[in-house]
Image (cartoon, helix red, strand yellow):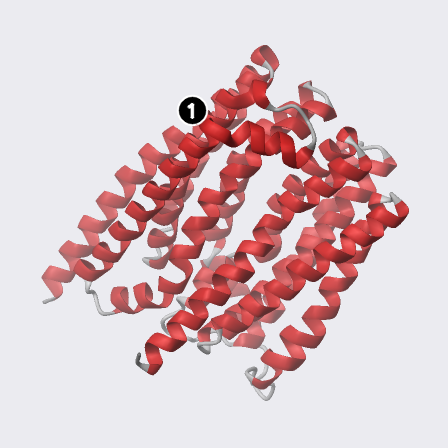
Amino acid sequence: MTNEKKIFLKNFIWNIAGTGLNSFNSLFFLIIVTRINGLSDAGIFSIAYATAFILYTIGVYSGRICQVTDIENKIKDKDYIVNRTITCILMIFLAFLFVLVKQYTPYKARIFILLCLYKGTEAFSEILYGIMQKNELLYKSGQSLTIKSLGGLLIFLIIDYITHNLILACCSMVLFNIGIILIFDFIFVCQKLIDFDTKVDKQNVWQIFKSEFFVFANSFAGIYVLNAPKYAIDNYLTEDIQAIFGYIMMPATVITLFAQFIFMPYLSKLKELFEKKDMKAFRSISFKIKMVVFGFGILATIAAFVIGPEVLSLIYGKELRPYRIHLTIILASYILYGISYVNLVLLTTMRSTFVQFIVYVITMIVAWIGSNLLVQNLQIDGAAISCAITLSIQFGLYTIVTKVIFKKVEQISKNEF
């Protein structure tokens, strides 16, 4: 095995381990809260975590994709770090503003703010992970995520089990994340990679905001689209129903995670192929990734229909067999979303972001109107149906747009040669 293949394999394995554990933490957190604190607290935790994840897109702004695929490398690491510091502060400010507007109870508001702080630490970490990945140290970010995921989960479980206090449990994992960022992410890894002699370029900091706005807008809209049914439930139904919907939504995230697992290690390669205008190889890798995601999604949906409710009932200790069809509909919808996510990353790599913004504006409108109307009239049935309708429309739009952009780029490449 060549050294290049060894590095790729090492990056691939640690990225899967770290990203997987980090993403599945929301599942484990919800199990812990359900078992220890009860169904009502689980409902509060579910909507608070979903909202914190939406605000996380403000903190992370353009994300790691644009940082890693920055072909010209005109923007320095310190510029990215300053930009990320500003977005994280903005994220927390908006979290407080959201709580005031929604007029949550003090208890619900505290949980919401703490989970936003938790996601804020993750948003800041992402800029350091981008530095690691650009220096062929993707495995280091995977190791960091593994430590944070396992350690944070363990501390959350211990504190919540001992105190039965959800607020203290949330505080503990925020403090743990901050500790790992300082000790591992910065001192152990990134301190050696960042050029501290260069001055921060204010124009570059502003340029990130300006050039990557549509990437941010697309991410923000994308997360809202996925969580629109939860907000409709928050408006019209109870915390208990919110918790149940959270339980049956959770397995669907496996498909999205799988798409991320498969895609992230190929990101640098796709950037390289696009830079060389080798669209044949670019398209080939893209197609294979989509087929793998589709195949995995089909298997996951079949498994969800056959044994999903029984497994979830065992995990959460709640009777979920009446929601078999809801679970299956949501899983099938997320197959389409997984492929749309692949198209999103491809178009972002090709710097085609404005057209994605148009796609998301349309799907946001569909999600907002559809979720509120259907949930108000059909309750949890309407939540599952609105999810299917929205993601189907999004898939159709993304498929059309991606084909058009591919043909356009290929035509430009042919004319150049």
Q: Quadrant of residue 310?
A: top right
Quadrant of the image occupied by residue 146: bottom right
Q: Is residue 123 above or below residue 187?
A: above
Picture quadrant of residue 398: top left
- Crowding around mark 1 (Cα neighbors within 10 Å: few <14, some 14 to 19, many 20+) is some
Location of the C terminus (image quadrant): bottom left
Question: Height in image: 287 above or below 121?
Answer: above
Against 356, residue 307 (above or below) is above
The total number of labels drawn is: 1
In the picture, measured across the screen, residue 236 lies left or right of residue 76, that is right
Residue found 10% across the figure and 61% down from its top: 415
Residue annotated with mark 1: 389
- Give x and y (percent) for residue 381: 54, 17
Most extreme residue toward the right is 163
- Report the residue at 13% width, 65% height from top: 416
Amino acid marked by disc 1: Ile
The x, y position of residue 263, in whole percent, is 38, 57
x then y, percent, for residue 104: 80, 33
Answer yes or no: is residue 105 visible.
Answer: yes
Q: Identify the residue at image location x=43%, y=66%.
A: 12
Q: Classify residue 274 as left or right of residue 187.
A: left
Whole-percent x and y of residue 293? 35, 46
The local secondary structure at tag 1 comes to helix
